[in-house]
Amino acid sequence: MQSEQLSLPELALGTEGSGSAGGTESPVEELGRGERKPRFKAIDRSQLQWRTLDIDKLIAEDHPARAIWEFVGGLDLSAYRVQVRAVEGVAGRSAINPQLLISLWIYAYSQGVNSGRAISRLCESDPAYQWLTGGEEVSGHTLSDFRVENAERLKQLFVQVLAALSGEGMITLERVAQDGTKIKALAAPDSFRSEEGVSELLKKVREHVEAVDQLPEEESSERMAKARDRGRRERQQRLEAAQKEFEKLEAEGNSKSKSGQRVSTTDPDARVMKQPDGGYAPSYNLQLSTDAANKVVVGVGVTQAGNDFEQLIPAVERVEQNLNKKPEQMLADGGYVSRENIVKMAAGEVEFIGPQCDDAAKGASSYERRGVAPEYYTAQFVYDAESDSFRCPQGKTLAYEGKYERDSEVSYRYRAQFTDCQGCPAKKLCCPGNQATGRSVHRTEELPEVTQFREKMKTEAAREIYRQRAEIAETPNLWIKAKFRLRQFCVRGLRKVGMEALWACLAYNIRLWIRLRWRQRLLAVTAGA
C-alpha cells in the first residue's frame, strides 16, 4: 500500500492525515475556506510625529566628541571672542561660539571630513555633530570662512594645545624626528601656463569683467547671477597672483629658463612635485616635527620647495618658537643631510642624527645628468699631495686653479689644459659639455663638525637611534593621509594651505591626548564610582 503524500502546507503545519481528534478543523482546512491576505503594519511617511530627544544621550560617555569639547573649552579663546560684534542687551542675532566652530573642525578632520558644506550636512543627521551643536544648524559658509580666517590666531591655538600636552607630560623634546610629505594641491596639472599664457588669459578676463561692469544694472542681473560674477572676479585675482609668482620665481633665481617656467592659474602658489609613486602633480611640501616620547607633532610647516635640504633649520626654529625650547636631538633622513645643516645644527647645540653624507652618490647623480661616463667620475682621478694636482684616467694633469667657500665648506678646484681636453679621445665621455675650458674636479676640505658627524654615525649607538626615525616621523604622516584622508588640500594658496595643515595636526594631537590621557582618566573615574 502506497503511503499518502502530504502537501507542503500540511508538512509545515504538522498536519496528520484527514483531521484531528475532537472534530476541530485543522489550519489547512480553515485556510482552504477562503482567501485571507497577510496583514502588515502600514508605513506612513506623510504623518507628523512629535518625539522627545535627549541630545546629551545621542553619544556615549566616552565618545571623542565629548573629549574634544572638553579640551577646547579649557583653552583661552579670548582672541576669537574679541571680534564678536553681538553683545548681551543689544538687539540682533547671537554669534556662534568659537568653541563650537573649533570643536567641529577638529572633530571633522579626525573623521576624515574636511569640507564646511559636508560638516553642515552632518550637523543635521549625525549624532556626534548634533551633540556638539546642541541640535542647532551651522552654515557651511560660516565654517569655511572660520577655517581660513586668521592664520596667526590659529597658530597661537596650536601653541596653546602644545602647552597643554606638555603640561600633561606628553612632550619632552629629548628626541624629535623631522619628515616631509607631499600633499596634492587643489589644482589640475593642465592648469599650469607660461607667463605669456597667463598674461593673455588675464587680459581676456579683465576685458570681460569691465564689459560686465558697464552693463545696465537690470540687464546685468538678468544675464548672470551674482555668484557667477564673483567667480570671474576671483579668477582675475588668481591670474594676477599667478603673474606675481613669475616675478617671485625670477627673484629666487629659478634654474629653469623664463620660457620654461609654468605657474598654475588655479593655485599660483602650488608647485609640480614628485610623488611617492614616481609621478608628478601640483603639490605642497608638508613638514612635520614629531616628538619621540608620544609622537606629538610639535612643529608644522608648509613649503613650495620640492626638496628638504633647506627645511631642517626652519623646523628647529619652529619647535623652539612653539615650546620656548630647542630639541635636544633631531633625527632626519638623507634629504636633510648636508654639510651646511651639520655645521648649523652643531652651532645651535642640537645633536643631529642622520645618514652619512654620500658625496659620491650626489656627484654621480650630477655627472649622470651631464652625460659623463662612470669611468670619468671624480673618484677615478688621482690626487698628488706633493704637487697639489690631479691626474686624469688619460694621464693628463689637472693643476690647482683656486679656492672657494660655499655651504659651510672649503673647496679647491683643479682644471686641465683646454688643449689637452680638446684633443683627448675620451672627451665625449669625460667632459661632453665643455666647449671653452678643460675638465675640472674639486677637492673638499672637511670641517671638524662634519668629521665628527661622520665618526658618530659610524657607531652602533647612533645607528640604533636613527633606526627609530621612520616609526616616529611617519606615524603622523600616515594618520593624516590615511585615517584623516588628507591626500589633497581643500583650499588654495600657501597661507590657507598652511592653516589647513595646522587644523589636521590639531586634530591629530588632540586624538592622541584622548587615547593616552582622557580615556585613562575616564576609566579611572568609572572604576571608582
Image (cartoon, rainbow, N blue to C red):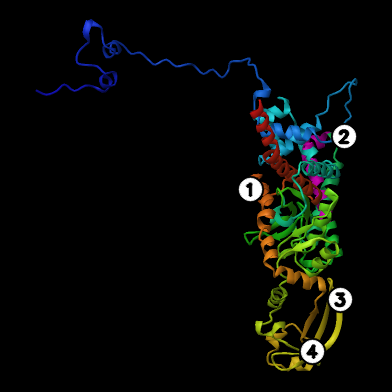
Quadrant of the rendered structure where residue 461 is? Answer: bottom right
On whether residue 221 falls in the magenta region, the answer is: yes
Distance from Cα at disc 4 to Cα at disc 2: 68 Å
Q: Judging from the image, what secondary structure is the residue with disc 4 in? A: loop
What's the magenta bit mostly, secondary-structure-wise? Answer: helix
Query: Tag 4 or tag 3, which sits nearer the N-term?
Result: 4
Q: Quadrant of residue 374?
A: bottom right
| Rendered residue at 80%/87% (across/down) | 415
Whether residue 439 appears in magenta in the rendering, the answer is: no
**Residue indicated by mark 3:** 405
The quarter of the rendered structure image containing the C terminus is top right
Q: Earlier in the sequence, mark 4 or mark 2?
A: 2
Could you say whether the residue bearing mark 3 is in a helix, strand or loop?
strand
Task: Pick the quarter of the image with the N terminus.
Answer: top left
The residue lying furthest to the left in this view is 1
Mark closer to the observer (1, 2): 2
Q: How crowded is mark 1: few (under 14 residues within 10 Å), some or many (20 or more)?
A: few
Instruction: Identify residue for label 2.
Output: 78
Which kind of residue does numbered mark 2 sit on? Ser
Disc 4 + disc 2, Cβ < 8 Å: no
Indicate the amino acid at tag 1: Ala
Q: Percent from the top left, x then y, of residue 387?
A: 81, 92
Q: Tell me if label 3 and label 4 are in contact, CB under 8 Å.
A: no
**Residue under numbered circle 1:** 482
Residues in magenta? 218-243
* Real-space CA distance between mark 3 and mark 4, rounded to the nearest whole angstrom: 20 Å
Q: Say which mark, if any, is on residue 385.
A: 4
Disc 3 residue type (three-letter): Glu
Of circles 4 and 2, which is in front?
Answer: 4
Q: Real-space Cα distance between discs 1 and 2? A: 34 Å
